[in-house]
Structure formats: C-alpha cells, structure tokens
Image (cartoon, grey):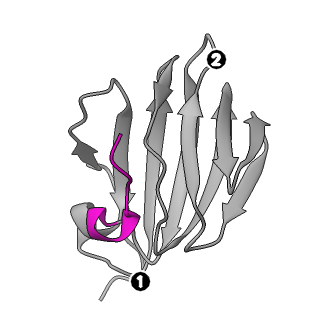
Amino acid sequence: MKKYSVQTSPFIVSTTDGKIIKEHFGLASTGNSDISIAHMIAPPGWSEPFQTPEFDEFTFIIKGKKQFIIEGETIVLEAGQSIKITKNTRVQYSNPFNEPCEYLAICKPAFSIDLVNREPS
C-alpha cells in the first residue's frame, strides 16, 4: 500500500463567475470529507455572497490581493499572507482589485456546498 498520493488531475469546479477552482484533495476530487485543498484564481471584480461555513477555512495568497469581510470587519491580504477563519463565522470573499488573485484554500472538514451556507445574493 502506498503511503502517498500525487494529484495530477485535480477536479475542476464549474463556475459562472470567472473564478478558476481546482480541487486537489477533498470531496469532489478524492471523496475525502476530512479536508480539502484547492488552488484558485479569482478574477478582478469577483465576489461571493456572504456565507457562514461549517468548516474552518485557511487561505494563503500566492499573487494579488483578496478582500475578506469577517463579521463586519474588512481585511485585505496580499501575496505571502495567510488567514484562518473559524467555522460558523459570517464572511464574504471578494477581489475588488484590478488584478487576479491566486490563492490556496484549505477547508477542515472538506468544503461542501451543503456546509457553506451562502446567503441569497
């Protein structure tokens, strides 16, 4: 039995907002509900509705900037910075800037549309 798994074919999540989501490990890609790891690129002007996820989310910014509105507080992260947002926290993610934002998102337990609790937009 191998003690490692190399991901060469991440699950590409279909989006309608121009965001690129490649899940390397998680429910959609490997069936793992414990953790998900995704590589994402959010285009300029992108945003999601507010949500209150039932998972902890860690974000590491590779390039560009990303805006977070967390319980009413606005935070902007730049390349090389990271953040942990604890589950059951109301948050909105966006890229109101003029350049794409490339980042990694790690969710524990794994991201699931059933656990994200997005508000109507």
Pointer 1 local density, CA inside 10 Å: few below 14, some 14–19, many at least 20: few
User: In which quarter of the view is residue 61 placed?
Assistant: top right
Estimate the x, y position of residue 111 in percent, counting from the top left: 38, 65
The answer to whether residue 80 is left or right of residue 69 is right
Q: Which residue is more in the foreground, 17 or 121?
A: 121
Mark number displayed over residue 97: 2
Whole-angstrom CA distance, mark 1 to mark 2, is 41 Å
Mark number displayed over residue 116: none
Pointer 2 local density, CA inside 10 Å: few below 14, some 14–19, many at least 20: some
Q: Which residue is more in the foreground, 7 or 18?
A: 18
Residue at 53% across / 61% down in the picture? Answer: 106
Estimate the x, y position of residue 110 in percent, counting from the top left: 40, 72
The answer to whether residue 36 is left or right of residue 17 is right
Q: Which residue is mark 1?
A: 3
Amino acid identity at mark 2: Phe
Residue at 35% across / 44% down in the picture? Answer: 22
Estimate the x, y position of residue 78 in percent, counting from the top left: 77, 33
Amino acid identity at mark 1: Lys
Q: Which residue is more in the foreground, 12 or 77?
A: 77
* Image quadrant containing the C terminus: top left
**57 falls in the magenta region:** no
- Classify mark 2: helix, strand or loop: loop
Q: Nearer the viewer, mark 1 or mark 2?
A: 2
- Extreme top residue here? 98
- Classify mark 1: helix, strand or loop: loop
The answer to whether residue 38 is left or right of residue 27 is right
Residue at 29% across / 89% down in the picture? Answer: 1
* Part of the protein shown in magenta: 112-121
Estimate the x, y position of residue 24 in percent, counting from the top left: 37, 56
Q: Which of disc 2 and disc 1 is earlier in sequence? A: 1
**114 falls in the magenta region:** yes
- Residue 47 versus residue 32 in the image, above or below: above
